Image (spheres, rainbow, N blue to C red):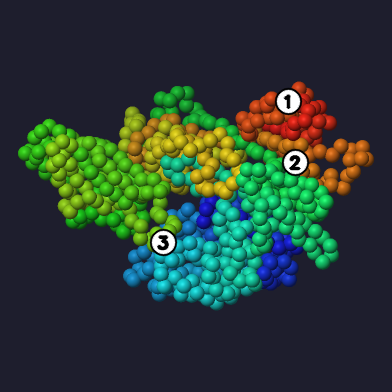
C-alpha cells in the first residue's frame, strides 16, 4: 500500500538465482523453491509508472542492489478502461515487463489483487464497476465477484499462455489476491468473511502452481499465506505454524500529498526494522538480546539487538563484548564478527543537482521566450452542446464518471433591487460547500475566489465576498478532482463535487438566498478537452500578446529536447494549478501554488524510536512538488509540443528544464563501524592495522572523482551537502583524501588515527567526505 515496498521471507539457506523453478511450495520457515528454502529480498516496480524503455535499467539496478524478486501490482483500470475492452500495449504491457524481469534472472511476485490501493486512482478499480446495477465492491456480492473473477482469470491465463509461472519454468513464484482487506473488513460486517473465503478459493482454483498470499489478512484460509505490510513486521506471526513469515510491504517512505511537507524515513530505522524482522523469526525477544541460528553442520549466525530508544548498551556474547547503540541491531554472520550495525550504515549518499535551462534555448530574453508561446482561453461556465439542466446539485463522480477532473455548475439568478443586502450597501457573501477536492467560483464571468481540501479532509467550504448587481447574475462553480479515493472501507462511495448548500448571504443584515434547489446547468469537462488541446492540435491557438497570471488559459509551446542522456524534468515554478502534456502524453497535475505549512520540519531526524508518517518531514513552506519527470522516450530531438492548462493563473515563461545530474557523493564512517568482511581473517599482530573503511565510487563507470568538497577526520557534524568541522579535525584530512581519491572511479580510506593522526585523544572519531564526480 504505502510507497516503496520490500518483500522479505525468513529462512537461512541462501542460494543465488541462476535458473527458474519447477516447483514452489512453502513450509513454516520459508518459500521452498525446487526443494530448497530461500531467503528472498524483493522490491516493487510498478510497470505503468515508468516507460518500457526505462524498464531494463530499473530492473538491472534492482538486481545490482541485491534484489531477488520484483513485485508489481496489476492495474485493472489501465487494462480494462471500458468493460470488455482491453489494453496491454506500451506502458500497460504486463507480459513484456514480466519477461524482462525474467531475462535479468529475477523472480516475480504478481500482485493481481485486483484491488491495488497503491496511491492509484480508485485503488486500481475501473470506474465502470461503480455503475453496474446492484454491485457492491469488495464484499460478498455476486455482480462484483463475477467481474473480479473474470479479470483475475484473464490475467492468470495470459501468464500461463506465455509460460510465466514457475510451475511452467517461468519467473512468477508468488501471486496475490485482494490487498489489505483485513484493515477494513469489519466495516463490511458478516459479508466480509464469505467474501475472503470465496476470493481465496477462486484464486486457488486457477491452478497457477505457485502459492497465493493475502496482505494484512489474519484470517486468510489455507493454503493462502497471510502476510504483513507496515513500517515494522518483526512482531508479526502467520495464522498457521505451517506458513512462513513474509513481509510484503516494507514502507521505506510515505506518499506525498499536495499541500504537504515531504516525508522521509531514516535509513538507520529501515535497516533496524529489516534486521529485527530477520532476527525474530517468530520468537520473542526483549531489550538487548541475542538470537542465534545454527545449522546441523555447526554454522552459526547471531543478531544482537538494543531496542531501547535512548540508551546505548553493552552485551557480552560468546565471551566477547559488543557495543549496541540505541535502537540498533548488530548482525554476526559467524557469531563472532559484526558485519553490520544498523545505526552505523556504511553507505554512500548521492545528492542530485539540477541543471536548469530555458525551454527555448535560442531565446535571449523573457520576451523572446514568451513569443514562442501560444494560448487559448477556456470559456467560463457553459460552452459545450452536451450541457444539461437539473434541479438541485449533483454529486460529481456519478456525473462525470471520471472522464474529466472538471465539472461546471452554472446558475443564472435574478436578484431583485429591493433585496436587503443590496439596499444597505453591504457586500454579499457566496457560501459553497463541496465534498472536494477543489473549487473555483466565478461571478459574472470573473474569478471571485477558490477553495481547496487536503489529504486529510477533501471537503471544501468557502465564504467568498462578492459583488452582485440588481437583475441577472451568473454564478459558475468549477469543481475539480485530483484523483479519486483509493483506500478505506467503501472508498468507492466517497463522493466529490458541490453538494451544497449554496447560498447568498448578506454580510451585515443576515439575509440569505438559498440557491441549492434551483435549476443548475451542468457541463462535464472543458471545451479544450473536447477540442483535443492536450495534443496541441487545433487551429484556434493565438500567438498575440501572452496573457499571464490569469485563470482558465491553455498554453502551448514547441521545444527541443535537452542534449545528453541525463534524466530530465520540467520545473513548474511560476505556475499555479493545472495539468501538463508533452507530445500528447500526460505528465501529471501540477500545483506549486499549494505550499506546505511552515511547521513540522527539522534539519535532521532522530532515527531512534518507532517511525510514523509524520515523524520526519522536510520542504516545509514550499510547494509539495515542482519537478515533473519527462521520459526521454517521449521526446524527439526537436519539434516537441508542451501544452498546459492553467486553472488559477501563472507565468509559463518561467518554466524551465531541470536536467538531473549527480551533485555530490558522500560517506561518513566512524572508528566504531564494523570492519570490512575481507579483513575478518587478518591478524592485527601480523603488522597490519585493522580499521573500518570509508569507500566511495562514482555511479557511472565513465566518471572519476574530480574534486573533494569536504573532508574531516575528527568530530565532523551535519549530513551530506551540509557537513561542517567539529571541535577537532585533522589538518591532514583533505590532503590525504585528495591523494587517495582524485582521478579514480572509486577509492577506499582507512578510518583510523594511523591514517590521519589523532586530533583529539580519547574521543571517538569519524571521517566525513563529500566529493564530486565528472
Q: Is residue 183 above or below residue 632?
A: below
- For marks 1 and 2, give the CA distance: 19 Å
Residue bearing the label numbered 1: 729
Of 393 and 612, which appears nearest the observer?
612
Please say whether residue 561 is visible from this viewpoint.
Answer: no
Q: Please rate how many residues cluster around mark 3, counting C-alpha atoms within 10 Å: few if below 14, some from 14 to 19, many from 20.
A: some
Please say whether residue 199 is visible from this viewpoint.
Answer: yes
The answer to whether marks 3 and 2 mark residues whose Cβ atoms lie closer than 8 Å is no
Residue that appears at 72% across and 52% down: 304
Q: Is residue 86 above or below residue 609?
A: below
Residue bearing the label numbered 3: 489
At mark 1, the secondary structure is loop
93 to the left or right of 502: right
Of 72 and 554, which appears nearest the observer?
72
62 to the left or right of 78: right
Q: Earlier in the sequence, mark 3 or mark 2?
A: 3
Residue that appears at 27% across and 42% down: 462
Residue 673 position, x and y percent, is 75, 41
Q: Please rate how many residues cluster around mark 2, counting C-alpha atoms within 10 Å: few if below 14, some from 14 to 19, many from 20.
A: many
Residue 742 falls in image quadrant: top right
Residue 524 position, x and y percent, is 29, 52
Q: Please rate how many residues cluster around mark 1, counting C-alpha atoms within 10 Å: few if below 14, some from 14 to 19, many from 20.
A: many
Q: Earlier in the sequence, mark 3 or mark 1?
A: 3
In this view, the mark in front (3 or 2) = 2
Residue 744 position, x and y percent, is 77, 34
At mark 2, the secondary structure is loop
759 to the left or right of 444: right
Amino acid at each position: 500500500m504505502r510507497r516503496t515496498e520490500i518483500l522479505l521471507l525468513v529462512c537461512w539457506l541462501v542460494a543465488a538465482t541462476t535458473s527458474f523453478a519447477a516447483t514452489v511450495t512453502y513450509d513454516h520457515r520459508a518459500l521452498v523453491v525446487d526443494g530448497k528454502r530461500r531467503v528472498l529480498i524483493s522490491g516493487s516496480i510498478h510497470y505503468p509508472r515508468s516507460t518500457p524503455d526505462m524498464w531494463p535499467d530499473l530492473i538491472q539496478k534492482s538486481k545490482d542492489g541485491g534484489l531477488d524478486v520484483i513485485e508489481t501490482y496489476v492495474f485493472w483500470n489501465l487494462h480494462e478502461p471500458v468493460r470488455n475492452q482491453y489494453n496491454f500495449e506500451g506502458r500497460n504491457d504486463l507480459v513484456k515487463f514480466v519477461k524482462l524481469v525474467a531475462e535479468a534472472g529475477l523472480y516475480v511476485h504478481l500482485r493481481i489483487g485486483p484491488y491495488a490501493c497503491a496511491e492509484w486512482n480508485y485503488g486500481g478499480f475501473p470506474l465502470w464497476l461503480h455503475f453496474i446495477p446492484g454491485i457492491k465492491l469488495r464484499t460478498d456480492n455476486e455482480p462484483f465477484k463475477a467481474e473480479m473473477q473474470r479479470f483475475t482469470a484473464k490475467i492468470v491465463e495470459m501468464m500461463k499462455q506465455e509460460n510465466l509461472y514457475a510451475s511452467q519454468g517461468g519467473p512468477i513464484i508468488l501471486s496475490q489476491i485482494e490487498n489489505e482487506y483485513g484493515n477494513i473488513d469489519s466495516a463490511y460486517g458478516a459479508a466480509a468473511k464469505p467474501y475472503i473465503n470465496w476470493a481465496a478459493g477462486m484464486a486457488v482454483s486457477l491452478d497457477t502452481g505457485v502459492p497465493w498470499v493475502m496482505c494484512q489478512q489474519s484470517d486468510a484460509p489455507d493454503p493462502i499465506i497471510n502476510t504483513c505490510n507496515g513500517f515494522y513486521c518483526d512482531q508479526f506471526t502467520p495464522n498457521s505454524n505451517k506458513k512462513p513469515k513474509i513481509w510484503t510491504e516494507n514502507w521505506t517512505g510515505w506518499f506525498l500529498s499536495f499541500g504537504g511537507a515531504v516525508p522521509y524515513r531514516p535509513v538507520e530505522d529501515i535497516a533496524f526494522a529489516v534486521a529485527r524482522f530477520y532476527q525474530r523469526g517468530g520468537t520473542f525477544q526483549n531489550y538487548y538480546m541475542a538470537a542465534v541460528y545454527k545449522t546441523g553442520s555447526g554454522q552459526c549466525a547471531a543478531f544482537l539487538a538494543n531496542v531501547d530508544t535512548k540508551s546505548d548498551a553493552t552485551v557480552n556474547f560468546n565471551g566477547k563484548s559488543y557495543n549496541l547503540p540505541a535502537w540498533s541491531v548488530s548482525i554476526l554472520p559467524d557469531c563472532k564478527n559484526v558485519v553490520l550495525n544498523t545505526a552505523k550504515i556504511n553507505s554512500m549518499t548521492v545528492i542530485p543537482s539540477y541543471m536548469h535551462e530555458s525551454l527555448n534555448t535560442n531565446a535571449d530574453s523573457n520576451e523572446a521566450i514568451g513569443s514562442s508561446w501560444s494560448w487559448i482561453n477556456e470559456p467560463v461556465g457553459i460552452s459545450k452542446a452536451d450541457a444539461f439542466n437539473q434541479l438541485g446539485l449533483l454529486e460529481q463522480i456519478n456525473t462525470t464518471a471520471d472522464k474529466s477532473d472538471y465539472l461546471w455548475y452554472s446558475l443564472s439568478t435574478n436578484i431583485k433591487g429591493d433585496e436587503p443586502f443590496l439596499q444597505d450597501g453591504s457586500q454579499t457573501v457566496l457560501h459553497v460547500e463541496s465534498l472536494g477536492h477543489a473549487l473555483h467560483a466565478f461571478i459574472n464571468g470573473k474569478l471571485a475566489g477558490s477553495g481547496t481540501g487536503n489529504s486529510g479532509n477533501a471537503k471544501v467550504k468557502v465564504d467568498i465576498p462578492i459583488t452582485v448587481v440588481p437583475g441577472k447574475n451568473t454564478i459558475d462553480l468549477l469543481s475539480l478532482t485530483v484523483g479519486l479515493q483509493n483506500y478505506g472501507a467503501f472508498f468507492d462511495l466517497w463522493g466529490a463535487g458541490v453538494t451544497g448548500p449554496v447560498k447568498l448571504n448578506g454580510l451585515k443584515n443576515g439575509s440569505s438566498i438559498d440557491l441549492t434547489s434551483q435549476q443548475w446547468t451542468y457541463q462535464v469537462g472543458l471545451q479544450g478537452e473536447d477540442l483535443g488541446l492536450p495534443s496541441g492540435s487545433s487551429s484556434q491557438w493565438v500567438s498575440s500578446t501572452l496573457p499571464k497570471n490569469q485563470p482558465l488559459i491553455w498554453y502551448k509551446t514547441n521545444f527541443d529536447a535537452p542534449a545528453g542522456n541525463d534524466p530530465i524534468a520540467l520545473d513548474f515554478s511560476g505556475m499555479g494549478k493545472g495539468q501538463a502534456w508533452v507530445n500528447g502524453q500526460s505528465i501529471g497535475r501540477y500545483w506549486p501554488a499549494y505550499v506546505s505549512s511552515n511547521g513540522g520540519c527539522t534539519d535532521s531526524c532522530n532515527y531512534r524510536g518507532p517511525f510514523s508518517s509524520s515523524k520526519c518531514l522536510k520542504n516545509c513552506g514550499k510547494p509539495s512538488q515542482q519537478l515533473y519527470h519527462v521520459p526521454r522516450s517521449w521526446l524527439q530531438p526537436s519539434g516537441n509540443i508542451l501544452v498546459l492548462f492553467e486553472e488559477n493563473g501563472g507565468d509559463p515563461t518561467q518554466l524551465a528544464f531541470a536536467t538531473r545530474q549527480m551533485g555530490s557523493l558522500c560517506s561518513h564512517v566512524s572508528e566504531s563501524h564494523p570492519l570490512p568482511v575481507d579483513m575478518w581473517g587478518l591478524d592485527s599482530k601480523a603488522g597490519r592495522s585493522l580499521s573500518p573503511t570509508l569507500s566511495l565510487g562514482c555511479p557511472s563507470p565513465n566518471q572519476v572523482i574530480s574534486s573533494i568538497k569536504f573532508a574531516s577526520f575528527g568530530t565532523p557534524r551535519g549530513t551530506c551537502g551540509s557537513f561542517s568541522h567539529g571541535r577537532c579535525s585533522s589538518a591532514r584530512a583533505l590532503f590525504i583524501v585528495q591523494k587517495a581519491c582524485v582521478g579514480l572511479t572509486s577509492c577506499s580510506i582507512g578510518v583510523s588515527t594511523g591514517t590521519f593522526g589523532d586530533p583529539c585523544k580519547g574521543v571517538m572519531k569519524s571521517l566525513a567526505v563529500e566529493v564530486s564526480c565528472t
